[in-house]
Amino acid sequence: MPTLFEKIISGEVPATIVYRDPRVIAFLDIRPAAPVHILIVPNKVIPTTDDIDDEDESLVGHMVIVARDIARQQGIAKSGYRLIINCNPDSGQEVYHLHLHLLGGRPLGPLVQRPV
Ligand code: AMP
C-alpha cells in the first residue's frame, strides 16, 4: 500500500507544493504547528530514519540543504527555525515515509515537553 506521501509525490493526493526536484518534494503541512511548517520528503520510499541506508547519505544531506534554502526563501533563516524528523511510535511518527519538518516563524519553545 502506498503511503499518503507517495500519493502526494505521484499527484494522486493534492498538496501545496513549494519545491520539487528529482530527489525530493516539499509541501505545506496540512495541520501547521507554526506559521511556517513545511515537509521535505524524499521521492525514494524510506519508511523511517531507521531504514536509511549508508548509500542514502547524500539524499539525506540534500534534504537538509533543501530545508536551508526554503527557510531562506520563507524569510526565517535569521529569526530561526527547527528541523525535526520523527522515528517510530515514541516520536509520534504518523506517516511512515521519511520526512523532515521545517518549522519557524515564531519562537518555538522547548524542544520536548518535560514529563509532569
Ligand atoms: P509525523 O508525525 O512526523 O509523521 O508527521 C506527519 C505530518 O504529516 C503531520 O505534521 C501532519 O499534519 C502531516 N500531514 C498529514 N496529512 C497531510 C496531507 N494530506 N498534506 C500535508 N501534510 C499532511
Image: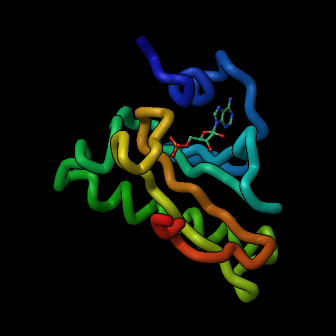
As rendered, which of 101 and 24 lies closer to the eye? 101
Residue found at the far left of this picture: 54
Q: Residue at x 39, y 36 (%)?
A: 44
Give the side of residue 23 with respect to residue 78, left or right.
left
- Furthest toward the top, the residue is 1
In the depicted structure, whether residue 109 falls above or below residue 52: below
**Residue 40 screen position, x and y as percent:** 56, 51
Task: Indicate whether 78 appears above or below 113.
Answer: below
- Above or below for 109 versus 90: below
Which residue shows up at 43% across the image and 35% down it?
Answer: 97
Q: State ligand 1's quadrant.
A: top right
Residue closest to the far bottom: 78
Q: Is residue 51 visible?
A: yes
In-image side of 44 versus 82 (left or right): left
State the residue at coordinates (43%, 51%): 86
In front here: 59 or 40?
A: 40
Occupied quadrant, residue 12: top right
Q: Position of residue 48 (x, y in %)?
A: 33, 42
Q: Is residue 97 left or right of residue 47?
A: right
Q: Is residue 17 visible?
A: no
Q: In terms of depth relative to the viewer, which is nearer, 23 or 113?
A: 113
Counting every numbered tag in the picture gives: 0
* Residue 1 coordinates in the image, percent (x, y): 41, 11
Indicate how the structure is coloured in the image: rainbow
Q: Position of residue 73 (x, y in %)?
A: 77, 70
Residue at image position (48%, 22%) is: 3
